[in-house]
Structure formats: structure tokens, C-alpha cells
Amino acid sequence: MSAFAYRYVGREELPARLTEFDLQQFFQLTSADIAAIRERFRADRFAAVGLQLVCLRAFGRPLDRFAVVPRNLLQYVCEAFSAPLLSIASLKSLYQRRPTLYEHQQWVKEYLGIKPFDVTSQTALQEMLRVQAAAAPDVDELVTTAQRWLYDRCRLIPGQRQITNLARHAFSSYEAQMLAAVNRAVSAATLQQCMESVRSPRADSSATHLEWIKAPSRRNGPKNLAETLDKIRYLKSLAVHEWNLDDIALPKLRAYAQKVQARRPAKTKTLKESTQALELVCFLRMSLLELTDIAMHQTSRRSQDLFRRAASTAQLTHTRSAVEDRQQALKAKAVLQDKSKSTEQRVDEALEHLAVVTDAAHSSFASHVRAALTGDHQRIHALLSGLEGLEFGGREDDPGFANLKTWRDLQTRKLNALPEDFSETGVGTAWHDLVHDPDPKRGYQAFSACTMSSATLTR
């Protein structure tokens, strides 16, 4: 059922105003409802019982408060029974006698088939809350989940305090499990080191490391990508990537991380040490996950920019080459049409003009792009080397993953040219000639471009 259908579930009183749409959707009496009330109660009770019925059906709990009742709802209920308009004062006067209120509510419960909230229901609800606490960001979310769970099972929703206490107990129990998982994954010394580090100011700024990490990533660009990668390296220097937090559900990690994100650092210091530790660990772990995703997105955007630049360069080169080739062809044609020269002379001169015609017309536009990428080695090398320190995984038979491993191996050996023992693994036929250039440095540049284009991180 959609969240809209639960709009009034769990409420204890009516709103001051009720739209006609809500009146039609949530507070309607059927002909069977009207007939049942007419059969059971006398005429001066019709409207009051009808109001109790529509409210219990919408709220999942009986209506006990009558300080505010929308006028259009009272008017609708009275018109349904062809009764005079009932005022709020008359309604309060009627229900001053509690047995009358309880009698009406009990009849409505039985008529709608709503069962009481007994021990069995409470046990089942507690088990459900125990499971849902693993994903709920706060107690209010658990309260809402509990109310909807009871409503769907035609169980009477208890008072707000009782259901809140049940939700708070389930939430606290899971929070204790989270804290135990954090204590297992992060030693006290490591945790203390992390707290001191994130609160310390950065060398190049007055802001602390925590404020720096909390700052959102800006637009795509080489500098912003470098800053994102610096944040990842900083978090990895704290060994955040080594923490085993598999026992904590991802929604919980995100919820506790958002608390740190939304709170001023000074406020965090006022919390209990255990709460600070739990929230900080969740924040650092979630920040590492999110920054890694952002880095991959920014890397992909950067590689796309390099491809567009190469395509633009290739287009200019291709166009210029085509114009030059056409000029040479026209010169050869003019020579062949010159009757003042012998056939042998005309053929020799025409061949001289055609000798400078390039083979570009016989190559594809994609090949020109690959050549342009090879020439843009400085930017491509900066992009790939900037990812140093990030660990990538993949299948051994994946060309992109194989190329990235080989390229990093060349970087480890501090080579700027392909060695004699270089063996290609993920280089396809399209890049073969460029990579196997007679010039090893040129081949290395082509292999770098091939790595960027074939690696899974750019797809």
C-alpha cells in the first residue's frame, strides 16, 4: 500500500481543516455502515457513532479528543443520516458520560473487525520492530512502521506513548549491537586516533579535516577530482577501508552519518563518547563509500571530456587532410589534361602530386580519435596516475582490468616507454598498430590511451 493511503493512520485527533478530497478518500460512510448504525442505535446517536466509525477506519485507533472537528466532516455525517447538524458542544456533552463513549467505540471496533492489542499482538510487533530497527534511521520511523503494521492487520493501535516506548526499546537494542560491532572492528587506540585527526586543522586551511570531508564535492574538473581523491587517501590513511562493518546495515550507516553531516562539530562534542564513536565511525565509512562513487563519476566525466577533445582534434585533422588531398588530386588531374606534354611526362608529374596524398581517406574517424588520444598523453597520464592508491577489482579476462594492472605495473617500474618484454593482454586490434609503434615512448602513450578507453572505470 502506498504511503498516501496511510495518511491519517495513527492520529489521535482530527485536523482543524479537512479538504474535500480527504473527506471523499478517507472519511466516507457506505450504505452498509449507515444501515448497521440505524439498526443498532437511536436517531440522536447516529451522527456521533458515524463519526466514531469513519475516524477509527482512518486512524486505526478510536477518537477520544473532540476539541476540533472539521465542520464539513460533521455536516457530511449528519447529512448521511438526514439528521440535524451536530455541534462540537453537543458532541462533547454526549460523551461526557464515559460509558456512552466506550459503548460506541466498542461497537465500532466489533463492526470493523478490529481486534484488541493483546499480548500476542505485542510480541509479534516487538519482533517486527527488532527486524525493522536494522534499517530505520530514527525512532519516529519505527513508530510509523509499527502503526502501519498494526493497521494492516486490523489490530487496534495503542496509545502514542506505549507504541513509542516499544519503538525506542527496539531502536536502542539495535544501537547497542551497532556499538558492539564498531568496538569489534575498530580498536580503542585507532578510534582515538581518528577522533584526534578529524578534529585537527588541515595544513593548508583553517578548517578541520572533518569540515573538509563534510564539504560537498563541486563541479567536475581536474582540480575537483584531485580533491576527491585526496579525501579518499586521507580516509584510507585512517584505515577506514579495513573496518569490517558488515554487521551494520547500510541504511543505518547512512542515517548515523547524516547526523554528523547535519550537526555542527561543536555540538558533536557534547554527546556521549559512545555516541560520538558510533556516529564518527559510520560517517567516515559512509564518506569513503560515497567519495569513491563520486570519484568514479568524476573520472568518467573527465575521460569523456578527453574523448570529446580528441574527437574535435580528429575532426579538424580529418577535414584539413581531406582538403589537402583534394587539392593534390586536382593538380594531378590538370597535369593529365595538359596535351602539351607527352603521356610519359604527364603520368610522372601526376604521380608526384599524388605521392603526397595521405592514406587518411582509407581510415575511419575512430582511428583518427585514437591517434589524437595518443597525442594527448599528458592529460591522460595525469588522469590515470591520479587514481594511484585506489584499489580496483575485476575479472582476469576483462580487457580493461588487465590493461589497468599492466599500466600500474609499468608505473611501479617507473617506465615511460614500453619495455622489450611487454606483452599485451587487453589491447585489441583497433589499438594494436598504435601500441606496437616502432618508437617505444609513442607505444607507451598509445597504451595509456588504450587503458583509459578500455578500463571499466570509464564505461
Image (cartoon, grey):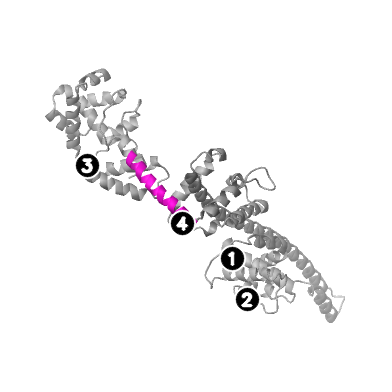
Res. 10 image quadrant: top left
Amino acid on which the number 1 mark rests in the picture: Ala
Magenta residue span = 165-185
Give coordinates of residue 429: x percent, y percent.
Answer: 62, 74
Residue 229 on image: x %, y %:
62, 55
Q: Earlier in the sequence, mark 1 or mark 2?
A: 2
Mark 4–mark 1 Cα distance, whole angstroms, equals 36 Å
Q: In front: mark 3 or mark 2?
A: 3
- Could you classify mark 3 by the number of other residues whose Cα lies within 10 Å: few (under 14), some (14-19), or many (20 or more)? few
Residue 214 to residue 53: above or below: below
Q: What's the residue at 48%, 42% (across, down)?
A: 272
Check residue 424 in the rendering and tell me which mark sits there, or answer none: 2
Q: Tell me the residue that label 4 is attached to.
A: 184
User: What residue is rendered at 45% in x and 57% in y?
Assistant: 246
Q: CA distance from mark 1 to mark 3?
A: 60 Å
| Kind of residue indicated by mark 3 | Asp
Residue 154 in the magenta stretch? The answer is no
User: In what element is the residue under mark 2?
Assistant: loop
Callout 4: SS = helix
